[in-house]
Amino acid sequence: MTVNKKHIAIILDFLEKTYPDVVTQLRHENPFQLLCATILSAQCTDRQVNAVTPALFARFKTPKDFAEADIAEIEALIRPTGFFHAKAKKLKGCAEALITRHGGEVPRDMDSLLALPGVGRKTANVVLNAAFGVPGIVVDTHVKRIAFRLGLTRETDPEKIEYDLMAVLPEKTWIAFSLELIYHGRALCTARKPRCPECGLYPICPRSGVKPG
């Protein structure tokens, strides 16, 4: 699809000025904690993840701790995040893979991250972006929704959306753009009741009915 370059510039300018200090909302002290927190964030709010990780990381500090842990204990600590049986299995499996394949260190490349249990492109990009500063676009529910609303993609598959956005956005904006859309999705462009009249992007948004110029 063809995207209006002028609109891209307006979108980027608005987001940068409106959300100048964006950071991941998942609390962490190192790449491994961020990896675990992101795995836990599947179908769960960042707030809920942040409510359970202090106790989780106090009990299990390293990949070795998770690998040797009783999975029932992990489950008990992460239960409020939902799907705790599957998530505990992923956390333990991921820790075991980090030890056997990477000496207990979180890898810094997409392919290695994707080979870990419980890690998809969203999780990998979160870790690469926030822990290592590697450019990439995180496609969560906010990014998926708003990118579609703004006419930046017509895809529904997250990986295809990621590639669409990478094709039209300057690489230097990728990390901030994902976070800015997440902030915007929480503040104004919500799923059920978007506050369109209050949004500075509304004049160029397809939802307004104004044709690109």
Image (cartoon, helix red, strand yellow):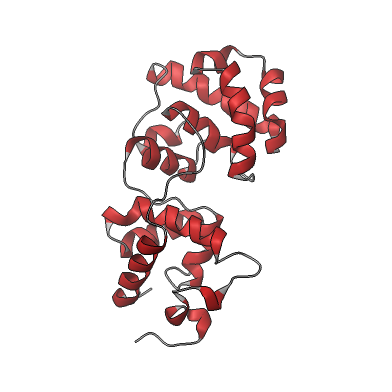
Q: Residue at x 44, y 42 (%)?
A: 126
Q: Residue at x 48, y 80 (%)?
A: 206
Q: Give the quarter of the figure containing the C terminus.
A: bottom left
Q: Where does residue 136 sit, x and y in percent of width and height?
A: 36, 48
Q: Where does residue 107 sit, x and y in percent of width and height?
A: 37, 29
Q: Count the marks.
A: 0
Observer-nearest residue: 10 or 32?
10
Q: Residue at x 51, y 21 (%)?
A: 95
From what the image shows, is residue 169 above or below residue 27? below
Q: Residue at x 59, y 70 (%)?
A: 194
- 133 left or right, relative to 31: left
From what the image shows, is residue 176 above or below residue 38? below
Tell me the quarter of the picture where residue 127 sits. Answer: top left
Q: Is residue 92 visible?
A: no
From what the image shows, is residue 182 above or below residue 193? above
Tell me the quarter of the picture where residue 130 sits. Answer: top left
Observer-nearest residue: 42 or 177?
177
- 136 left or right, relative to 142: left
Q: Give the quarter of the figure containing the N terminus.
A: bottom left
Q: Where does residue 147 sit, x and y in percent of width and height?
A: 47, 65
Q: Where does residue 82 sit, x and y in percent of width and height?
A: 71, 38
From what the image shows, is residue 90 above or below residue 166? above
Q: Is residue 94 visible?
A: yes
